[in-house]
Amino acid sequence: MATGMPVRERLALTGRPPRRAASRKAADRRFGYLLVAPTVILLLAVTAYPLIANLWNSFHFDNLSYGSLPHKFVGGQNYTNLVSSRSGWVAALERTLVFTAVTIAFDVVVGLALALMMHRKFRGRGLLRASILIPWAVPTVVSAMLWKTMFDPRAGFVDYFLGAIHPAWSSLTWLNASVWRSWAAIFVADSWKNIPFVAIILLAGLQVIPHEVYEAARIDGASAWQTFRRVTLPMLKPALAVALIFRTLQALLVFDVIYIMTGGGPGTSTETLSFLNYQTFIIKTDFGAGGAISMLLVVIALVISAGYVRFLRPQT
Amino acid sequence: MTILEGRQPLAIRTIRRRRDRRKAVRGALFYLAVGVVVLVALFPFYWILRTSLESNSQVAAGVGGGNGIIPSHLSFSAYPNVFSQQHFLAPLVNSLIVALGTTVVTIIVGSLAGYALARLQIRGAGAILGFILLAGFFPVLAMIGPLYLLLDDLHILDNIYPLIIVYLVYTLPLTTWLLKNFFQQIPAELEEAALMDGATRLQTLRRVVIPVAIPAVFTAAILSFILAWNDFAFAISFLRTTGHFTAPLAIVTFGESQFQVFYNLIDAAVVIVSIPIALLVLFAQRRIVSGLTAGSFR
Amino acid sequence: MAWPYRSKVFAVAAVGAVMGLTAAGCSSSGPGKPVSATAKQTIVFAESGLGPEGAQTQKAIDAFEKANPNIKVNTDVLSSDSTTYLSQLEQSFTAGSATPDVFESDVTYPAKFAQAGWALPLTKFHPVMGQYFALGAAAGTFNGTAYAIPWFDNPEGLFYRTDLIKTPPTSPAQVVSDAEAAMKADHSLKEGLAFEAAKYEGAITAFLTVDSAFGGKLTPSNVDTPGNVAALNWLHNAVYVSHIAPTAVTGWQEGQVEQEFVAGHAAFAIDYPFVESLATAAPVKGHVGYIPFPAGPGGTPAAALGGEMLAINAKSAHAAAAWKLIQYLTSAPVETVRAEVTGDPPSLPSAYTSALYAKAPYFQNVKTLNNFAAPRPVNPNYLNVSADLQTLFSSVYASPSSSAAAQALKAGTSTISHDASATPGS
């Protein structure tokens, strides 16, 4: 008897009285709801509740800075303000999208190379895997502070090594002194921390490709490149999709590394959507405008993750 | 014939030798690439360790001269100072409380849900799983506003305990999925037998399923701990006084004072915060890898 | 119409249950009957003191209690981070709490407290504002009414190395030429001028430290004035034209500036008085000069005001006793002792005594600076104005363009005046 066979069919085979089975199934189901309830309620409390509150707030005036002024209805004003040039939301959206596109393209390519590397059997594989995992596992605060130190002209190694190549590069200021250098530093810190995740997911994808497929390709006389293009990549698709979507969302919502490394500067040139969200809520204590930013952020994130869920729909 | 016979092995030998050489070169290149990867991943850690072992005056002098890749002398003052001057112990303890608290709640709640979703054939299981997955993707920064107001109204802003609940958004989706997948793989016969013997579902879960699931639970616990330990966004939004900070938040605010804060001090704290995580990775890398992949794609 | 989640009942019932946490009892109480200063009473004092400062405050309070046996003072020590401290106070005030009765306030906040009706107008106590440094007193005055009394005035000014620069510069141009000369003469210098230009509050005080030397004034309704442009240009040119300051200033806060100066890397530094007390080793020991930033054409010597003030909760029933405490803490002898112990510069010129100078001679410089220290804009929306200014300065310091300052001020002025004058709910 197959272990994975549904209970119902198994019961039919063994011919146990159906009524007892049915009553147990009903009891099971009730018990099941009880077991699932805490998880669902807790997750609703931390996601659905903020969502509804944000939706409400986004149509109202609600700013703690003005004490206890009434939270009156303002229609779509919070949303129209966002799209106006003064808010900087549109610029932040553009920046966030560009950062996301560049980051995921780079991370997936490098992550795939690392996955292929870890997939080979060789001495020292454990060391390689641990080295790759550690940057992923440490807090973003650690990776951001660490790279902030590295990019510091006095304390870091970046300028120290660059200075060895060219004397003029020995005291470059990276953070907040130039827009592109600030982004470069953020990009390095973010990729260093997140590529490992992509690599691990892709490694798992590589490991489920049956060995016979490679054998067959080899017998057909395929070159290494052909095997990679025609066999590995297509069979890696599910893992690639997972890695892509996880990373897309992470990059889209990037906050910690930017807050720590540049504080959104120089000027506003590294402010992303999440950064704007934080600033509006916590610094400006404007929960109306913050609610509107949040709703739009949720919509963008949901559209992407809905695609992911659809792709991964469980076979229940 | 004899000549030909004599030449053939020679030709094969040269081809083989050439192939061997190519193989050796390729192998060397491969190891070189591995070396580069390991270096890029770990060298920054070496550098913070190095900076944390410098004296204040060495840090102030900057990199160069005797303060190159290997500093001319070591100073351990930053480590005691990070506790005596920056009061880093309280944030560390806070982080530990919150991360462990989150892990415990996650494991209890998540394993129950995972079991129900794997075994108990509840209606709408697909929708529930979909919701749990979506919750894991919810933009964290979009949640902080309403939660801030709520915590404010409840007078539990600037308190670490609500974080235990809030952090579930990081840990519960992954854990529930991971354990659900694991429970599905446990042969149903084990439970059937116990149920036949008249055990209730809860007893079966406790005596039969959980013992088998210990490895997966352990994996979920490690991942939950890491995710909770690593948070910054919620901590900076909800915590206000330095005594209530978590360790990552404390590190970031070190520099925000008029007093002397050198990189050696910050980096000593960075090293301290990284150590538990690095140890977890070293001892449980297999579990972490399997947990990450099982939780996200199957 | 109010969204129900703001109601505590709903919140506790619906989500508090889910969160498994019970709300702490709400402690807010409405305004009570005013209690006379001579009655037996307990008042609450909120402060952000840490370490030696907190200890000194406690000492002063003990002495106050001894002198006024009918008044007991409980201290609430809140965050030492000023923004955090503000939000903690806001929580009490928005809840309508009658405590704290007296509170410490950063020099930039009284306008906000006044506008919101949280701080008590001090008119009825007839405070003698003329006895304080005039610019410090101005920071506590909103729409012509005094709401806060200066406790200590921390002026930001220009430090210079007396061993490298024999006579203090008398014009901004001379600061540049002196810095260039010093860098040429002493190669152990890494820069001529260190100042804080990171994207944070300090960038605003650094700017104010030079601003009035060029005839500038930070008025949120219009920041695009020739004086402000000239001042910001001078700082910008220090980085990009004369190169007396490195681009690294964009990452520096006052702590790093102090490190640069104290380590002997900088000929000039824009910073607060605490630097002087830390210059205890070679090569800077005994070679520290501290002056207002020298005036350029059409300007006056310049400095920026930091520091703390004291104010009374508008809902307090113990205003009379609170006022007594404020008077005590801001009396000359108490301020002098505090300066000796903690280095906090007195807000009263009369507290700068020869005894103080004997202990810490640099207070002579501090006193001079306090006559010039310009407060930041007195505006109820100062936090928003500050965020705008931080962004503006940060973008200027990252741009090598010679017109960066002029363009940024021109572009930013409408946003700043909008944020400064924003009246909500209209």
Image (cartoon, rainbow, N blue to C red):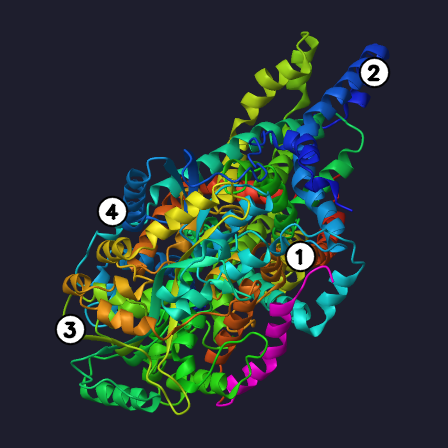
Examine the rendered structure and indicate whether residue C115 appears above or below residue B164.
below
Cβ atoms under marks 3 and 1 closer than 8 Å = no
Q: Which mark is residue A290?
A: 1
Q: CA distance from mark 2 to mark 1?
A: 51 Å
Between the C-alphas of marks 4 and 2, the distance is 66 Å
User: Which chain letter goes with mark 3?
Assistant: C
- Of circles 2 and 1, the one toward us is 1
Q: Is residue C341 left or right of residue B46?
A: left
Q: Secondary structure at mark 4?
A: helix
- Residue at 59 percent across and 78 percent down: it is C413
Q: Main secondary structure of the magenta part?
A: helix
Query: For this rendering, which residue is in front, B289 or B4?
Result: B289
* Amino acid type shown at disc 4: Pro
Q: CA distance from mark 3 to mark 4?
A: 28 Å
Pointer 2 or 1: first along the chain: 2
- Looking at the picture, tell me which residue is in the foreground, C328 or C267: C328
Name the amino acid, label 2.
Ala
Disc 3 residue crowd, few under 14, some 14–19, many 20+, Cα 10 Å: some
